[in-house]
Amino acid sequence: MKATALANSNIALVKYWGKRDERLILPNNSSISMTLDKLHTTTTIEFSDRYKEDSLKIDGRKVVDGEEFGRAVHQLNLVRKMSQSHLHARVESENNFPKAAGLASSASGFAALTLAATKALGLHLDKKELSVLARQGSGSACRSIYGGFAEWQMGTRPDGSDSYAKQIAPKEHWPELCMVVTVVTQEEKKIKSRPGMSQTVANSPLYKAWLETVEGDLEKVRAGILEKNFQLLGATAEVNALKMHATMHTATPHIIYWEPRTITLMKEVMRMREEGLEGYFTIDGGPQVKILCLEKDAKKIMKRAREVKGVQETMLCQAGEETKIIEKGLF
Ligand code: 2P0
C-alpha cells in the first residue's frame, strides 16, 4: 500500500498551449518534449485505513487546502476510483529544483504522483494508461511518463481516451543533445500556466495563427529528433516558443513571463550563434531560459550563460529516463 516514484520533468520543443476541454485536460494541439535527466520529483504515497483524511507535503511544507491540494486529491480520487478503494493517503513529494518558476514542476509532480498512487493501490498500468491518467492531473505530465523524447498526441475523442503521449526516441538515441537550464529568479510566477492558457485561448488574436502553424512545427521537430538534425530541431523549437509567447503577449489582459534577464539571455544565445557557437533558446510559462545545444559546445555555452548578470544557476541536462518506481521512500 506504499510506493515511491521518481519522475523527471520535461521541456517542450513544440509547446502545449491551450485546452479544448479544461476538466479532462485535452489540448488544442499536439506537443513534443525532451525529458530531462536532472530535474526531478520524488513522491512517496501510502494508502492506509489509519489515515482519516488525505495529507500532502511538498518540499517539507504541509499543503492543507487551496488549488495545489485540490488537484492532488483529484488525482488520488481518479486512482482510487480505478482500484475501487476508499482509503485515504499520505503523500510526500520533493523537487530538486525551484517549483512553479517555469521548470515544469507540475509535469514531474503529476507523473510521479500518478505512478506512485497506482502502484501503491496494486494497479499495473501500461505506459499509455499511465499517460492518460497523468494527463488528467496536468497536461504536460503525460509526456514525463516516457524517457527520451515524447509526443503528446492531442487526440479527437471527447472522453480523452486517445489523448496521451508516445515515445519518439529513447534517451540513448541522441546522447549528444544537451539542454542548459538557467535560473534567473527563484520566485514563483504570478500567473500560473492554467489561467494563462485559458486567457490566451479566449481572446488572443494570434492564437489562430498558433494553431495553424503548429502542425508544421511538429513535423520539423519530429524529423529533427529522428534525423538528429540539430539546426532544424533548434531553429524550429526557438520560433515555436516565441510564437507561444506572442499569443500571451497579445491576450487581454496580457501575460509577460519574461524578466529583463530573460531577454538578455535570449540575445546572448543569438550572439553566440553569430559567433559560431550553436545554441537555441526555449522558454515556458516563466522567466527561465533553456538553451538547446550539442555536448561539444555545452561547457562554453554554460560559461557564457553564467556570465550574464543575474543568472543564478545553470544546469547541464541531457535526455532523461522514464518515470519509475524506486526503493528509497521519503517516509
Ligand atoms: C508545455 N507548458 O508544453 C507548455 C509550454 C507551459 C508552456 O505544459 O493546466 O502545467 O496542468 O495542463 O501542464 C504548463 O502547463 O498545465 C505547460 P495544465 P501544465 O510544457
Image (cartoon, helix red, strand yellow):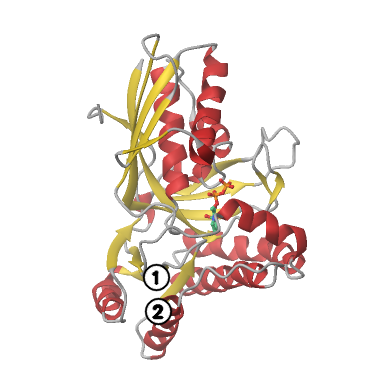
> Pointer 1: residues within 10 angstroms few (<14), some, or many (20+)?
many
Q: Nearer the viewer, residue 30 or 86?
A: 86
Of residues 115 and 171, the one drawn nearer to the viewer in this rendering: 115
- Dot 1 or dot 2: first in sequence order is 2
Q: What amino acid does circle 2 point to?
A: Leu
Callout 1: helix, strand or loop? strand
Report whether the residue tagged 2 is closer than 8 Å to ligand 1. Answer: no
The residue drawn where x is 49% and y is 24% is 125
Q: Amino acid at mark 1?
A: Ile
Whether residue 179 is visible: yes
Q: Is residue 95 left or right of residue 211?
A: left
Horizontal side of residue 246 vs 151, given as left or right: right
Q: Mark 1 to mark 2: distance in Å?
A: 9 Å
* Kind of element beneath mark 2: helix
Q: Please identify the quadrant where the N terminus is shown.
A: top left
Residue furthest out toward the top: 49
Q: Percent position (x, y) of residue 210?
A: 70, 66
Which disc, if any, is residue 291?
1
Q: Looking at the image, is mark 1 or mark 2 nearer the viewer?
A: 2
Q: Which residue is mark 2?
A: 265
Question: CB of residue at label 1: within 8 Å of ligand 1?
Answer: no
> Residue placed at 64% from the left, 56% from the top?
197
Rendered image: mark on residue 216? none
- Percent x, y for residue 43? 34, 34
Q: Which part of the image, by quadrant, shows the C terminus?
A: top left
Q: Dot 2, crowdedness within 10 Å: few (<14), some or many (≥20)?
A: many
Q: Find out whether the residues at labels 1 and 2 contact each other: C-beta distance under 8 Å.
A: yes
Residue most extreme to the front: 65
Relative side of 152 to 21, left or right: left
Residue 267, by quadrant, is bottom left
